[in-house]
Image: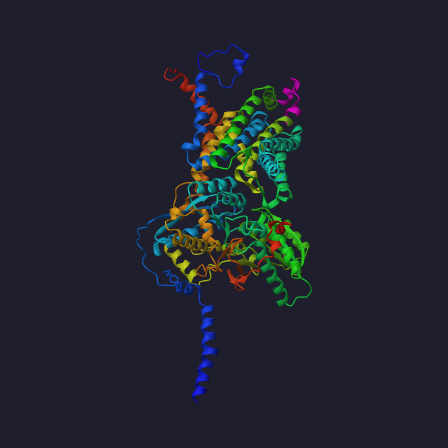
Amino acid sequence: MDPAGIYRTTYLDDMSIVRTKTQWTILISALILTVLAPFYLSKNLIDVMSLSCCILISTLGIQILTGYAGQISVGQAAFYGVGAYASAILVNDLGVPFIFSVFLSGLIAAAVGSAFGIPSLRLKGFYLVMATLAGQIIIIYLVSHMHFTGGMVGHKANYPSIGPLTFDTGPRLFWLNFSFLLLMTLMAKNIVRGRWGRAFIAVRDNDLAANVMGINVYRTKIFAFAVGCFFAGIGGSLAAHYTGMIHPTQFTLMDSIWYLGYIIIGGLSSITGCYFGVIFFVTIKEILTHLPVSAEMAQYILPITDVAFGVVIILILIFDPKGLNHRWELFKGYYRIWPLGYK
Amino acid sequence: MVKRSYNFVVNLVLFTFIPLIAWGLASTPASAQANATGEVYPGINAPWTEPKNVNFKGTITIGDASDLTGPAAKSVSQMSQGLADWFKYQNEFLGGVKGYKITADVVDTKYDSQNVINAFNRFIDEGKVLIYSGMAYTIPASTEIANRRKVPTIGSSGSVTQALLLPEDEAKKDNYFFQMSPVVASRMAILVKFCMDDWKKKGKKGIPKFGTFNCDTQNGHEAATATRIYAEKLGGHFTIHTFHSPSITDAKAQVTALKEAQVDYILNGPDYDQPLTVFALELKRQKSARWKPIFAGHTDFGTAYIDTGNNAFEGNYCYEYCLDWTDTDKPIIAFLHEINKKWHPKISQRPFLYQTGVQAGIVISEVFKRAIEKYGDPKNIDGVKIREVMETLKDFDPLGISGTFTYIHGDHQGTHSLRIAECKDKHLVPVTNFIQAVPLELTERDGKYWLKD
């Protein structure tokens, strides 16, 4: 929704992502503040933000797949893992430059994801969940037991480097991951507001009607899996080089469920919602995990944090089931007419 | 006559007093040895004193990333508690470490890899120079972070890959991961040998059949491979491996497979108390007059036995690389009973991993003591210096709570011995002394060697 008095007179204008001068000012200020974050935020916060960028990229993928295309997947962590392993193997074992390996990893994850998306042609809802669950289990089993993935030992992933520049410090890794996040956000935004995005929404809302309208439902579903997993692969690739070591235990079913949690809490069918979901989860998790308690009391107090986490999630779902993005939209609607609002 | 008396005295000295003194020195309890070095530990090798009121010169804070929640929390959280108790004692009764208060910043990693990665990065970003990790399974990534960022981690893993450097890497690399127990392969070697001896002792004929029950993790696979290799090496007959996920609700498939293979000994490496309990119950259910296998495995099997008191565990064995809560005749364990009465009056029983937490506390305090002696103010000490100091530990006695600690550049196992205890009459009854592990061959120091199965 645009502020009152803003009119769009061309189609291009109407399609623009950033629509007002205020939005441009906020966006540029936010970008500058984020890029300069390593200079004023603690190293630890930068590290957390770095890893969150990778998670966010993967969340954008599941938002497209589940939020827009309506294909519920509980295998996103495994596809994230595919990207991570692909990149680690490409860079460390095959000597592929990092910049190519990131995109290749995305493509490999997309190919694997498409294969596991094939059941979506026949299955829906809970049945599709079961199919993607099988994907999660099979992928993790395979990477745990294959020689070239390092099996149970895991696989190393060197620091990423592009040309002479090696990203071997916290701030550098953050800048790299953040750049990719911006790029992937733009990509996601463009996909969902374009022809494919409209096809995803049509298939999600009523695949029969979509078919009647001339949308190839099968191709759309497979493409949704490919796109969703491509994003997971890119995120996984960045995470592998950020962490330095990958192991099957880093890509669990629980992580896949959290991905659904991020988009549900953030807001389904919203790219901004992904940001809200991930930032909310990571912030709460960090606060509750790092409560300043004495070593003696830690074992009694820290486990309670899980309960607190659960309570916060329940409260959000009760008071705003449409997610945090909806709350943000309400807030925007309010401040745009402040102080001359009417009832 | 004088000469005869002289000879008598000389012989008496040579053959009686000298052997007696040598024997006495060799068998001096750890506490007395510690006393001999001049260290006084109230409640252990000296009478209890009042807590000291010390004006500390500063605080040394290490990181403690432990699974206080999750499937492994029940036992793993005890490591954190043991560490915290030792630091409390160190600060209140020993005046800290060289006048500095020592404490741990605890993060609950919740059995979640992202938490582990964030916790490690956070500790290092905050300038901590040593991290204690009481984590169940998410170690490889954290070890890599420790190695990349050159901050030592001391943990309870057991993996060859983490504890040992390949001979060709020794000159090129430093390893920042320090273990507190023998590697899994060595543990299994001791268990297999124990079973072979048990077979002979019972006068059974033929060759004993071995099978395994392990968690589907790196350590579990190391244990499985090692069991097969050592069973074949020591003249046993290896039959079958079975694996399980970290938490299970039934072990029917595994026990049935072991029963079909008619195994005599079921061996198990690092595992958790929950699946081991489920396994013990299923094993009891499937045992028959014709099939009575012996289980010998991870220390958490014993912990689960003490916790549940279920007779399904009876007659089976577990290994221990530390003293047990019931070893009250040992000064360090009697001391732990005392401090628990003082500080945790509601707790009457501590699982095995509590002792390993105390063991880590003793070692970490010693490391900082040596580091401060060498470099002065803790502010001058970084992770590289701590690693170097840790590698100076040679036959360091952690007050008798376990075997001695030795870290050398290529071998970060710490202790190299363990003992075996039987689950009997609601107690863990040691059936061996601490057995020294045979060092691995050079070719066996490659982690992949132990991950073939």
Name the one closer to the observer, B114 or A183. Answer: A183
Q: Is residue B425 above or below residue B367?
A: below
On screen, residue B237 versus residue B185, left or right, reads: right
Please state the horizontal and vertical placement of residue A4, each as a whole percent of the image: 44, 13
The N terminus of chain B sits in image quarter: bottom left
Residue A130 visible in rendering: yes
Q: On screen, A277 above or below B147?
A: above
Q: Is residue B329 visible?
A: no
Q: Nearer the viewer, residue B131 or B443?
A: B443
Point out residue B438 in the picture as x, y percentages from the top left corner.
58, 60
Report whether B35 appears left or right of A126: left
- Given residues B197 and B403, the one toward you in this image is B403
Based on the displayed image, in which of its 4 quarters is residue A206 positioned? Answer: top right
**Residue B361 lies in the magenta-colored region:** no
User: What percent of the width, then of the height, locates residue A296?
Assistant: 39, 49
On the image, the x and y values in percent for residue A126 come to 60, 32
Give the colour scheme of this rendering.
Answer: rainbow
x 44%, y 50%: residue: B386
Residue B185 picture quarter: bottom right
Please count the marks in the image: 0
| Magenta residues, dominant SS class | helix
* Identity of the residue drawn at 41% across and 52% down: B371
**A163 relative to B427, above or below:** above
Query: Where does the magenta region start and end?
Result: A206-221
